[in-house]
Image (spheres, rainbow, N blue to C red):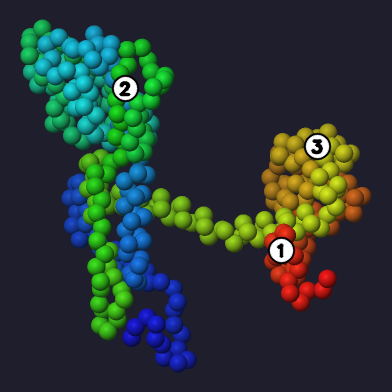
Amino acid sequence: MSGGQSIPGSKVSLQPLVPEISCAETTDVYGRFVAQPLERGFGITLGNALRRVLLSALPGAAVTWVRIEGVQHEFTALPHMKEDIIEFLLNVRAIRLRPLTGSGGRLYLEMEGEGRVTAADIIPSANFEIVNPELHLATLDSAEARLSVEFNVELGRGYRTPVPGDNLPLGAIPVDAIFTPIRKVNYEVQPLHIGRETGQERLILEVWTDGTISAVDAVSQGAEILSQQVSQFKYLALVSQKEAEKQLLRRSIPEDKYNKPVEELGLSTRTLNCLRRGGISTVGQLLERSEAELFALRSFGQKAKAEVQERLEALGLGALLGDKGQAVMKAALEAEGGRPEGTGPRQGDSQ
């Protein structure tokens, strides 16, 4: 039966299908994942979103500058090293580092004599693991050669180029930093037919990493980041209602009372300072806060609330403080039909 048909009297779920995710193939640097079944349109929605997050939002570690003994800038040469400094920096940029402690740090390289220099020659550190130790860095062609390098490693996301004016140590040479651990992401959406059901599809997601993270962990992290971003939209209705209540509150109170500074309420110094620290400077801002928000203010307790309540009652606004006031506003808003400020009465409302 197609998704749009139903048996009269039967209950039909209107929620989109929740797919099953399977790992079709995984290696140390590659993963192929299949999500099915998906309703039409969800394949490209999920595939494109995951691809963009994976390529731009996952954290990683990279060398951001180096300090080479005997070298002041990248346009000089180091005696007895075959590569020039620019070529050496390009090789350094390809070092892939797995962070072990969640913080940046320094790495060091000390080489003397003739031979090939690779990432494996970098002195081991408790902060990072080099996942491509075979990476070629330089070639020393004399017994008198000496290469001493300090590498600064930072954590970040995406790709970062050096910015003129960066506060670098004396003698430091900046390096383009490739933080992202993702090399490539592809996705494909295929039609899926299950029995007589049509209009469904499957998503095939392929991920290549640099070896500092597995493809499985990368997709899991990417999905978590995406979920955190999207989840904030769940509260949009709540935020809209709260804003509408604020607008109604403002319309319900004379402007001179709404904008009255809290300094003019005759509060004690302790209570007044408490409100100021909480960013409350007017009566209107005070009435917009829930009781939980007020009690979250430093040094604001029942005594301070009673004092504020007394001053507001003198203005005829005591019933609007805290949770009781918000309940009043909510009921009034429902009676108004939830109309935002400035829309005027609905058709049929009394004038």
Q: Quadrant of residue 128?
A: top left
C-alpha gap between disc 1 and disc 3: 36 Å
Q: Residue at x 24, y 47 (%)?
A: 184
- Considering the image in quadrants, where does the N terminus appear? bottom left
Q: Residue at x 18, y 23 (%)?
A: 87
Residue type beneath disc 1: Thr
**Gap in angstroms between the C-alphas marked 3 and 2:** 51 Å
Q: Marks 1 and 2, Cα distance to the nearest angstrom?
A: 57 Å
Nearest to viewer (mark 1 / mark 3): 1
- Disc with the residue nearer the chain's start (1 vs 3): 3
Figure check: 261 above or below 84? below
Q: Earlier in the sequence, mark 3 or mark 2?
A: 2
Q: Residue furthest bottom?
A: 8
| Residue 184 visible in the current orientation | yes
Q: What is the x, y in percent for residue 349? A: 78, 74
The residue that appears at 25% across and 11% down in the rendered structure is 71
Please, what is the three-letter code of the amino acid marked with disc 2? Pro
The residue lying toward the viewer, choosing from 95 and 175, is 175
Q: Is residue 278 left or right of residue 258?
A: left
Mark 1, mark 2: which one is toward the viewer? 1
The kind of secondary structure element at disc 2 is strand
* Label 1 sits on residue: 343
Residue 133 occupies which quadrant of the picture? top left
For label 3, the residue is 272
User: Which label is found at residue 174?
Assistant: 2
**Mark 3 element type:** helix
Q: Is residue 43 above or below residue 292?
A: below
In front here: 132 or 255?
A: 255
Residue name at image x 25 percent, y 73 percent: 192
Question: Which amino acid does the dot numbered 3 rest on?
Answer: Leu
Left or right: where does residue 105 sit relative to residue 276?
left
